[in-house]
Image (spheres, helix red, strand yellow):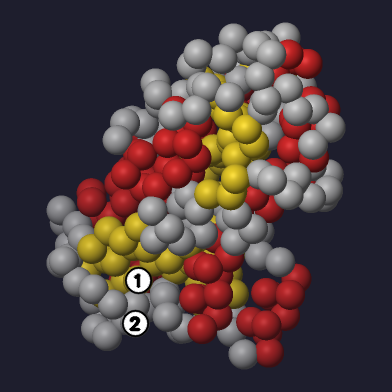
């Protein structure tokens, strides 16, 4: 369910399910999807299953929520994946361009702080997370760990995951300037797996055995705690479309993802389905 996701560490991840390159929709039966790397595994798995019963070509690119939304506004994709809600400035831009934006919630996710498996720390509070990321806490010894400097790893500002972290953990305070910024969930997984002093955060669906997820405020990041809302850092995952110009093929794919079969795919990808 959560294996082999570290291959998504690159800035741009393109799944050419029809072995096609390029960005613009140039055929009626082609769907271009861009955006969030968090939503990427859901979209990829759904597209693989969907292709078994249809000849529709699907091209998927994971380059961050902000980039996906920009592509939708520019008309270079049919569906924008996003791990955050669209911003007011983005909605205003869409309005000025005469676009009719529709928001579709496709799953619920948890943002989970992660450390290297060699790190003895198991639980952390929201207050401590904020202190680590704003620079107030700089050594693992302050958290009951080893006497070692904390290496802070964060998503870059084009990421929807960063936006949610910025709001829910940082309370809109900036991440420390020496934080190492990564372009994808997979890149953060790789960085933390290779550094015993590091801390990062990823979407729940990306957790694997190469890293250790932390409890937050004594709540374990599990599907059960995500469904119940107990886990403190959670958010919805979205697809955005221009409702005025969405193709029948793109709409059918979205309908498939929202169906009972699609909800099973969401769960198999390691996320929480929306009923």
Badge 2, how many Cα within 10 Å: few under 14, some, many 20+? some
**Furthest residue in direction bottom, as rendered:** 97
Q: Around disc 1, counting alpha carbons within 10 Å, would you say few (fewer than 14), some (14 to 19), or many (20 or more)?
A: many
Describe residue 52's horizontal placement relative to residue 120 as left or right. left
Q: Is residue 125 above or below residue 132?
A: above
- Estimate the x, y position of residue 144 in percent, counting from the top left: 72, 9
Quadrant of the image occupied by residue 146: top right
Q: Is residue 235 toward the left or the right of residue 167 in the image?
A: left
Q: Are marks 1 and 2 in contact (CB under 8 Å)?
A: yes
| Location of residue 250 in the rendering, given as x and y in whole percent from the top left corner | 36, 70
Task: From the viewer's side, name the closer residue of 259 and 219.
Answer: 219
The residue labelled by disc 1 is 32
**What residue lies at 42% left-to-right and 80% top-to-bottom?**
76
On the image, the x and y values in percent for residue 123 come to: 67, 14
Decide which of 206, 198 is in the foreground and name it: 198
The residue at 39%/21% (across/down) is 209
Location of the N terminus by quadrant is top left
Residue 214 visible, this orientation: yes
Mark 2: secondary structure: loop
Q: Tell which of 88 and 198 is nearer to you.
A: 198
Q: Disc 2 designates what residue?
A: 24
Q: Going from the N terminus, do you reach mark 1 or mark 2 first?
A: 2
Q: Position of residue 169 (x, y in %)?
A: 76, 38
| For residue 229, above or below residue 212 | below
Residue drawn at (84%, 32%) of the image: 136
Image point 69% across, 75% down: which residue? 91
């Amino acid at each position: 369910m959560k294996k082999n996701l570290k291959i998504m560490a690159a800035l741009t991840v393109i799944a050419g399910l029809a072995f096609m390159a390029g960005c613009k929709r140039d055929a009626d039966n082609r769907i271009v999807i861009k955006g969030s790397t968090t939503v990427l595994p859901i979209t990829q798995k759904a597209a693989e299953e969907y292709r078994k019963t249809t000849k529709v070509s699907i091209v998927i690119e994971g380059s961050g929520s902000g980039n996906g939304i920009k592509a939708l506004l520019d008309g270079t994709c049919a569906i924008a994946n996003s791990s955050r809600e669209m911003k007011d400035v983005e909605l205003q831009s869409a309005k000025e361009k005469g676009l009719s934006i529709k928001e579709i919630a496709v799953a619920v996710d948890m943002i989970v702080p992660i450390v290297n498996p060699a790190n003895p720390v198991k639980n952390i509070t929201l207050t401590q997370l904020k202190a680590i990321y704003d620079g107030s806490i700089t050594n693992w010894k302050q958290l009951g760990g080893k006497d070692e400097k904390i290496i802070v790893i964060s998503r870059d500002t084009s990421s929807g995951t960063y936006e949610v972290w910025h709001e829910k953990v940082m309370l809109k305070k900036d991440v420390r300037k020496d934080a190492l910024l990564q372009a994808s969930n997979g890149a953060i997984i790789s960085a933390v797996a290779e550094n015993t002093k590091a801390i990062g955060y990823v979407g729940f669906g990306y957790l694997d055995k190469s890293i250790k997820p932390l409890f937050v405020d004594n709540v374990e990041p599990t599907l059960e705690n995500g469904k119940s809302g107990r886990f403190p850092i959670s958010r919805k995952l979205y697809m955005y479309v221009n409702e005025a110009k969405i193709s029948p093929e793109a709409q059918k794919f979205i309908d498939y993802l929202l169906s009972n079969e699609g909800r099973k795919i969401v769960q198999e990808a390691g996320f929480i389905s929306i009923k």
